[in-house]
Amino acid sequence: MIPEQKELKPNTNSPLIKIKRKLIEFAVPLLFLVLCIIGAYYARLQPSFLINEIIMRMARNPVLVLALIIPVLAGMGMNFAIVLGAMAGQIGLIIITHYEVTGITGVTVAALIAVPFAIVFGYLTGKLLNRAKGKEMITSMIFGFFAVYVWQLFFLVFVGSIIPMRNEKMILSTGVGVRNTVDLVGIRYALDDIIKIRDLPGITIPISTLIVVALFCILITFFMKTKLGQDIRAVGQNMEIAAISGINVDKIRITAIIISTVLAAWGQIIWLQNIGTLNTYGSHVQVGLFAVAALLIGGASVAKANIWQVLLGTFLFHTLFIISPTAGRNLLGDAQIGEFFRVFVAYGVIAVALVLHAWQKHSAAKNK
């Protein structure tokens, strides 16, 4: 008899296969790193200007991206509804600007005022997403669009008519509605200026803001090791098993969204104190889109994300934002091409991530 031949299985521990896995895992960050290098070459920006802009954006943007992590770990995907958290932060800023509370005191008071609004907005968002399990991302996106128009209605119609506003610098000439642009000169750089290095030529390092970002990263890391954090992970891995284990799944999901919304409110305040100007009806509109794009560019997925992906994605996404208009002008003679490319990148990376997630879910269901 001919002896039965055993089927040879590929060696999954071989160095080549490990390298291949790593390349697949980091394909998106590597692609955008290459784009950044090519763009920087053609943009021909002054190194000091580029470094300064990157440092500034790494100080003011990561907290908004960090706000997405906990809903992802809770199995709810990308929370596009962090736009409601941004609104809560802006409510705090509008109030402290109206009463002329300035400096770091103003930033702190705005952050405290934003918390109850963010909790309410997060609770409502969480309740809605619990009724749309499996479709959280599209639901949060549409809910964010809805909230934008409610915001516009409120601040254009109700403020000045039903809700009094005595600060003439903020109200429209008709006496009803908040101006399109609110000057935040009273709190501009309030957090950045606490500890700032200006000794390097052309480079300013807001040490205090970077410390705040680092503290948020550390707090989220430790939070995920607590009992509540472990419950969030359990719900994200399998809601049915988590429920059998005695975890109140709906409550945990609402808690995850509330935390995300509060973080987004604080992130928006950090961002706007650096900008120094509040576009009343536009500053919050693209918050969810850009934060999600940055996280995905960092190598995260709609089911898995970590702190390092937040920082890497923020670095790559905003570096591309800095260099793309100038690179587009130098390459094609039109800076607007760079603007189109930035929007294309933001929407494109989200679309690809959603397609991959749907494909992975379909493959997993098929292999069961």
Image: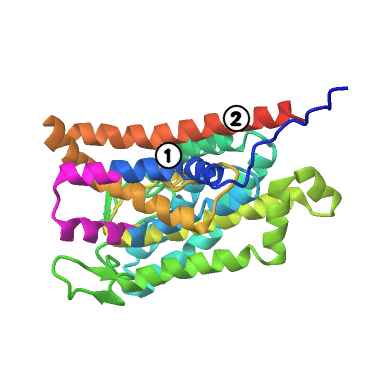
357 vs 270, left or right, is: right
Give the secondary structure at mark 2.
Answer: helix
257 vs 320, left or right, is: right
Could you tell me residue 130's position as x and y percent?
69, 41
Asked whether residue 164 is in view, the answer is yes
- Residue type, label 2: Ala
Give the secondary structure at mark 1.
Answer: helix
Residue name at image x 54 percent, y 47 percent? 15
Q: Residue furthest front?
A: 1
Residue segment shown in magenta: 36-57
**78 magenta-colored:** no
Determine the CA span between mark 2 and mark 1. 36 Å
Which comes before the other along the chain, label 2 or label 1? 1
100 vs 300, left or right, is: left
Q: How is the image coloured?
A: rainbow
Could you tell me residue 282's position as x and y percent?
34, 43
Could you tell me residue 275's position as x and y percent?
27, 57
The disc at residue 358 is 2
The disc at residue 153 is 1
Asked whether residue 98 is in view, the answer is no
Residue name at image x 34 percent, y 32 percent? 344
